[in-house]
Image (tube, helix red, strand yellow):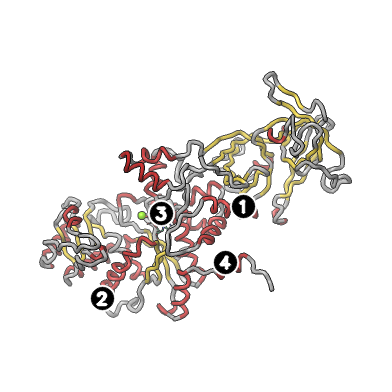
Amino acid sequence: MCMETKEEQRAESVSFVEEIVKTELEAGKNGGRLQTRFPPEPNGYLHIGHAKAIAIDFGLARKYGGVCNLRMDDTNPQKEDTEYVEAIKRDIEWLGFKWGEVLYASDYFGQLWDLAVELIKRGRAYVDEQSSEQIAEQKGTPTQPGINSPYRDRPAEESLRLFEEMNSGNMEPGRMVLRAKIDMANPNMHFRDPIMYRVLNLPHWRTGNRWNAYPMYDFTHGQCDYWEGVTHSICTLEFVSHRPLYDLFVDWAKEVGGDDHPMHDNRPRQIEFNKLNLTHILLSKRNLLILVKEGVVSGWDDPRMPTICGFRRRGYSPEGILSFIDKIGYTKFDALNQMSLFESAVRDDLNQRAIRVSAVIEPVKLIITNFPEGMTETCTAINNPGNEADGTHETVFGRELWIEREDFMEDAPAKFFRLGPGKEVRLKNSYIIRCPETDCCRKDADGNIVEIYAEYIPDTKTGEANANMKIKGKTIHWVSCRHCLEAEVRNYDRLWMVENPRDEISAYSKKTGAEGIDAMRPFLNPESLEVKKAYVEKWLSTRKPLDYLQFQRIGYYNVDPDSTPDNLVFNRTVGLKDGWKGK
Ligand code: ATP
Ligand code: MG
C-alpha cells in the first residue's frame, strides 16, 4: 500500500459546495458551463474572511475550467472608493487568482431601473410614501403577519410617476421607497414587500449624477448574476433566508426578459457556506476602518490587521493562507476557529520556504580569546535545510561576536546546555567553543555581564578533522560585531486580548453606551507591538521587502517595505512555537 501525499489527500476531500458544482456539471446542467463571481463591496480592504470566499469562487472556476468574474458590489455610493477597487484587485492577484472580467453592479443600474419600471407596470411593485418607522411597524414578526401598506394598491401610473420623482434629485432621502408587492403574511420576512429602491441623492463614483435613487442589494445581486450568466452564486450563510427572494427576483427578471433572452434556460443557483471566523481578530471592513481612522494601527496593511495586505506585510505567504482555508473547509454551520490553528499552518508553510539567517535581539558580547584580533574567516550558511535549491550564503566570523544574553549563565545548572563556566557549544556554521572554568565573563559596576570569554577548538568546523566532536551543548547563533548591521525589529503580537472581540465589544457597548473606538479600547492588547534593536548579519541588507526569513532560534520574520539599506526593518511574522499565553 502506498502512502497518499498531502496533496492527494487534499484533492480528495471535496467540500459540499464542490460536490454540488461537480454533480451539476456532470449532469450537463447550464450546458456544462461553470461561472462564478466574487462580489466584494469596495468599501474597504479585503480581509482573511474574503480569502475564504475567493478561494472557493475562483478555486472552483479554475479547477473545473470555468470562469470567475470580479464584480464590485457598488450600490452604496457614500462608502465606496476606487482606492479600494485597486486594493481588492491587488490582493486577489497576490493570492494567485485570475478573474475573467471586472464588472460593477453599477453597470446594471440602467437595466435594473428598466426592470423595476416593467415590474411596476405589471403590478409587482409600488411606491410607498410611508416613513421607514411605519414600514417597520407593519412588518409583523415571524409568527405574526404584517399589515399591507395603504399605498400597496395604488395605480401603476401613479407609482411610475413617483418612481421618476424618486430619481429626480428633488426628493429628500427617506420620503418614498419602491417596494415589491409579494406577501405581507409570508413566514419568510424577506417576502413582506421588500424595498427595491431608495432615494440617496448622492453622486456615484462611476455613474456620476445619473442616479439619485439606487437599488437595494437584494434587488441587485440575483439579477446581476442572471444577466451575467453566473451558474453558481456562492455566498455565506446569512443569505440562506434571502435565497427565496433571490430566486423570485431572478424569475421576474427572466419573465420580463422574455423567451428570447440568451440565458433563458440558465439560472444562477445560490449556495451558502459558513463564514470564516477566527479567535482574537475582528473582521468586517466597517470595524477595520475605525481602527485605521483612529490611528490604532498604521493603516489597512498594518501587520496586526486581519486584512490580506496586512498578512502579506506581516510575512504570511499566499500558500500559507490558502492551506489554512483548505484545512478548515466549507460547511453549513458557523464555527469559531482558533487563531493558533492559522498560525500553525503559516508556520508549516514558512518552515518550507524561509531562508535561515542570524539575528541577535538581546545581545551580549562574546570574545573568542584564542582567535587573533583583526583576522576573519568566511562561513557558509545553508539557506534552507529543506530545499537545497535555495543555496547558501556567506557570513563572517571574527574574534568579537554578539550572542543572545540568555545563551550564557554564570551559575549554569548541569542541564543548561548553552554557555557557562566550562561549557561547550557549537556556533552555527562555525567552530565549537568552550568557556573557561573560571573568569569566563566580565561585569560592569552594576553587576551586569558585559563580556563573555571562550576559546574556539580548532578543526571543528563542518568538514574538518574534529567536526564530529561530541559535546553536550547546543548550537547557538551569533553575528560578528564588526560585520553585522543594526536593524529595527518589530515584534507583533495579537491586536485583541480577548478571544471574541466582536461579541465583547458589542456587550460592552450595550452595557455602557460606548460606541466605535471607545467600545473597542478596553479589549485592545497594549503590547501588540514591541520595537527592538537587533544585530543582524550583513547579508540581510541584500534581502527584498516581503522576503520570507527565519531568524534562527527566534522566529519567522520578513523585510518590511519601510526597510532601507541604511535602516533595516524586520517584522515578526510568527514565533517558532505557539507563544500566546493569554493576557
Ligand atoms: P464585511 O462585513 O467585512 O465588509 P461583507 O460580507 O460585507 O464583509 P463583502 O465585500 O460584501 O463583505 O463580501 C464579498 C464576499 O466575501 C461575499 O460573498 C461575502 O459573503 C464574502 N465574505 C465576507 N466575509 C466573509 C467571511 N468572514 N468568511 C467568508 N466569506 C466572507
Ligand atoms: Mg458589506
| Label 4 element class | helix
* Residue 117 visible within the image: no
Which residue is at 37% across, 56% downward?
Answer: 41
Callout 3: 10 Å neighbours few (<14), some, many (20+)?
many
Q: Which residue is mark 4?
A: 10
Tell whether label 2 touches label 1 (CB within 8 Å). no
Closer to the chain start, of discs 1 and 2, is 2
Residue type at numbered disc 3 = Val
The quarter of the picture where the N terminus appears is: bottom right
**Image location of residue 116, percent across then percent down:** 22, 66
Closer to the chain start, of discs 3 and 4, is 4
Mark 4 residue CB less than 8 A from any atom of ligand 1: no
Q: Is residue 151 above or below residue 539?
A: below
Q: Which mark is residue 85?
A: 3
Callout 2: 10 Å neighbours few (<14), some, many (20+)?
few
Q: CA distance from mark 3 to mark 1?
A: 30 Å
Residue type at numbered disc 2 = Glu
Q: Which residue is mark 1?
A: 350
